[in-house]
Image: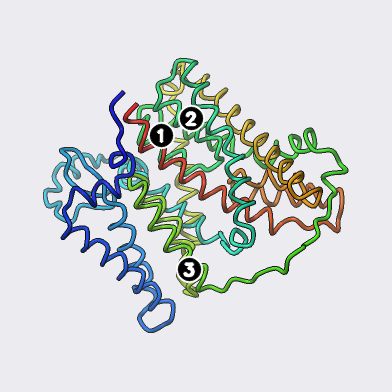
Amino acid sequence: MENIDFFTLFQGFGTMAAGGWVLAVARVFLIALGGLLVYLGWKGVLEPMVMIPMGLGMVAINCGTLFMPGNVLGNLFLDPMLSDTDELMNMMQIDFLQPVYTLTFSNGLIACFVFMGIGTLLDVGFLLQKPFASIFLALCAELGTFLTLPIANFLGLSVGESASIATVGGADGPMVLFTSLMLAKHLFVPITVVAYLYLGLTYGGYPYLVKLLVPKKLRAIKMKNTKPVKNYDAKVKLAFAVILCGVLCFLFPVASPLFFSLFLGVAVRESGMKHIYDFVSGPLLYGSTFMLGLLLGVLCDAKLLLDPKVLKLLVLGITALLLSGIGGILGGYIMYLVKRGNYNPVIGIAAVSCVPTTAKVAQKIVSKDNPESFILGDALGANISGVITSAIITGVYITVIPYL
């Protein structure tokens, strides 16, 4: 195992030190300028359709600088100096879906498009209402992501393969695709197929898990609000998105395209750009999801799926989702004890980050046992926190695993 120092693990700091103080100051200046452009775009002083994505892009690219092969500084967004396109065009075969695969799938772009669309679905106000409870539940609901890695490694998979299948526990398809592309590219097709096959279980299977682990008396709990509900305006939510995007890109630049895509979706939602919001949350999200499913289907070549590792992946995928569901419910029980009975443990299942499916599942289960119990707000807070937590764990895995 290679030595991992602080600057290697958190490459935002490492590249700041390696690039010299002039470049470091320039990066900090551009990060601040990017934040200012987002604000001015939101206020309408500057054109929001240009300034908000441009400003957030400046934040992400300057926070997300990392060490590339040869120890040069670079990023995972684009290379503006690319001039010789012959090699790229030679790769573009005349097969039916080859251009779509080459330009959107094999580089993770389609995962970023889906994640951008998911960002438009996230009202981070629910997370800001009860941040500590939401984050705690989200961490508990990553139990499958944490435990499946050593289990998979014990069963003979490499650490990279184990981490890739373990991310199925986060119930977040784009994360699984992105992680497997980075850590187990030879298995990313079966791993991603397993992930999307099992995502349906979060809607169909989790209700049975909740009913098995949570008695009806506790499922029917109607929570009492001891504090007045805070209403956060769009300015606060937009600032939250920009700051968190910058921090996460800085800490884990290798996953910065995912962070940027997610929080750009949040920024579009909160900025009031209705036409862009309609496009990202509609055609882009659903079109990308449709093409993702189509590509996954045509990639299911029998020769590839006859790999003996696929059976292990099937078992490990369901194990990861099961453990994450159990972890979320255990987190709900802990909150029930902390709140002295004024907390519905079912909320824990919503922390498994299949947005907004698991939050709706939680509310549906509770409503059947007590129509007067409304937990959707708390469930969405845990749900949104689960998305962010799964993205952070993806960043940790992609950063750390190559050094093991």
Of circles 3 and 2, the one toward us is: 3
Residue 374: x %, y % from top left: 78, 58
Residue at which label 3 appears: 238
Any part of residue 96 in sight: no
Mark 1 highlights which residue?
A: 180
Residue situated in front as seen by the camera: 8 or 346: 8
The amino acid on which the numbered mark 2 sits, given as a three-letter code, is Ile
Report whether 12 appears left or right of 229.
left
Q: Secondary structure at mark 3?
A: helix
Residue at the spot 39% in from the left edge and 76% down from the top edge: 48
Discs 1, 3 touching: Cβ within 8 Å: no
Residue ID at (37%, 36%): 181
Question: Which of the pair 172/255 is nearer the observer?
Answer: 255
- Which quarter of the image is occupied by the C terminus? top left
Nearest to N terminus: mark 1 or mark 2: 2
Residue drawn where x is 37% and y is 29% of the image: 184
Please give left or right for residue 221 compared with residue 49 in the image.
right
Residues at badges 1 and 2 in contact (C-beta under 8 Å)?
Answer: yes
Is the residue 323 above or below the residue 17 in the image? above
Q: Earlier in the sequence, mark 1 or mark 3?
A: 1
| Residue matched to label 2 | 165
